[in-house]
Each structure stands twice: as structure tokens, then as C-alpha cells.
Image (spheres, rainbow, N blue to C red):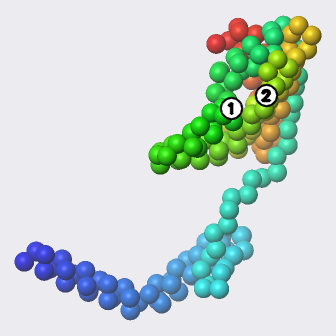
Amino acid sequence: MFRKKVLIVSIVSVFTTACSMGELTSVNKKISDFGFSITGKQSAQGESGMPKLAPKIDAAQDSMSSDLSVSIDVDTAAARLRRYYKFMTSDELNSIKNRESTSARLTAAAIEEQRPEWAASPGSYYKMGRNWGGGDHITLEVEKNGIGSRVYIQFFSSNPQHLTEAYLGNLFAQVKGVAEGKVR
């Protein structure tokens, strides 16, 4: 008896909804247009009259950079920075991408959203980068400099408050400490 009632309610709901789809569409369009008028954005509409989804566009980013010298060889400094800040090499990312499981592919997609950067010439140069917090990006370049290394830090952000010495001073000092092995 319960199954019959559920079936009847389902059938009636389907027919009722199908008959009023035009009304639902017009109400939805009015709500959408009202929302766009409040936010001041123009409604991007397709041929069906429904709003089109657009990909997220990153805001223009400015950058702040710093460079520092460390008395540690380039390979050790780069390894310490990579481990501490969890930068991923291209080989590690490709290894995850090539796995057959769905979870591995989802993991790889999540990592790629972080815009990872990796380049290496062992013994002379390393470049690593990834997104940092909400909308920022950091790139570290470590190159051989005599018996030590030179670390170039470039921090990108669309938020001008994130590009101040007050905001980045501790990070830049921490990078030096990590490269020298003082921060673990």
C-alpha cells in the first residue's frame, strides 16, 4: 500500500512539474536578473535565456621579490626548501597522474590547481613554486653562488596588503632559516 502511494505521489509530481516548467524558468530568470541588478554585473545569457557559466578569471597580480645568500650548497638548500614547503617535483606529479585509480586522478587535479612549478639542474639551479594561501603564489629559485647558494623569492598577489614588508618579512626570513637548516 505504501509503495502505491509513493508511486502515485511521484507520478503526480512529475506531471505537475512538467506542466509548469515554463513558469519555473520565468521565475528563475527574474530572480537571476534581480541578483545581477543588485551586484551590478551584466547577465551573460545564452540562447535559452539562462545565464552562462564562465570560468574563473584570476585578478591581475603584482609581485614582490627578494634575494638572499646562504652558505649552504645549492642541492641541500633546495632539498630543505622543497621538503619544508611541500613543493612537488614534476616526476612526482606525473607518477600520480599515471595511476589508474580515480582517487589518484582527483589528487593530481587538486595538485594542478595549486599551479605547481618545478625545474632542476642538480648541482647548479632549482626552481619551485605553488599557490600560497588564497590567491597568492610563491616561486623560489635556488642557484649556485660560489660555495654557497643564492635564493630568489618572488611572491605574487592580487591583494596589495600581501605585498608589504610587514606581511612578507617573516616569510622571507623563514625561507632563509629553512635553507640554512635553522628552521625545520
Q: Residue furthest bottom?
A: 19
User: Is 181 above or below relative to 113?
Assistant: above
**Frontmost residue, 137 versus 87:** 87
Q: Quadrant of the N terminus?
A: bottom left
- In the image: residue 27, left or right of residue 158: left
Q: Quadrant of the C terminus?
A: top right
Residue 49, picture quadrant: bottom right
The image shows residue 140 at horizontal and vertical percentages of 79, 28
Of labels 2 and 1, earlier in sequence is 1
Return the mark for residue 32. none
The image shows residue 158 at horizontal and vertical percentages of 78, 45
Residue 142, picture quadrant: top right
Q: Amino acid at mark 2?
A: Ala
Give the residue at mark 1: 89
User: Is 43 above or below relative to 47?
Assistant: above
**Frontmost residue, 112 versus 100:** 100
Q: Secondary structure beneath disc 2?
A: strand
Q: Residue at x 72, y 70 (%)?
A: 41
Q: Amino acid at mark 1?
A: Thr
Give the residue at mark 2: 120
Tell me if label 2 and label 1 are in contact, CB under 8 Å: yes
Q: Residue at x 82, y 17 (%)?
A: 123
Q: Can residue 19 be seen at all in this image of the molecule?
A: yes
- In the image: residue 85, left or right of residue 7: right
Q: Can residue 34 be seen at all in this image of the molecule?
A: no
Q: Residue furthest right?
A: 146
Q: CA distance from mark 2 to mark 1?
A: 9 Å
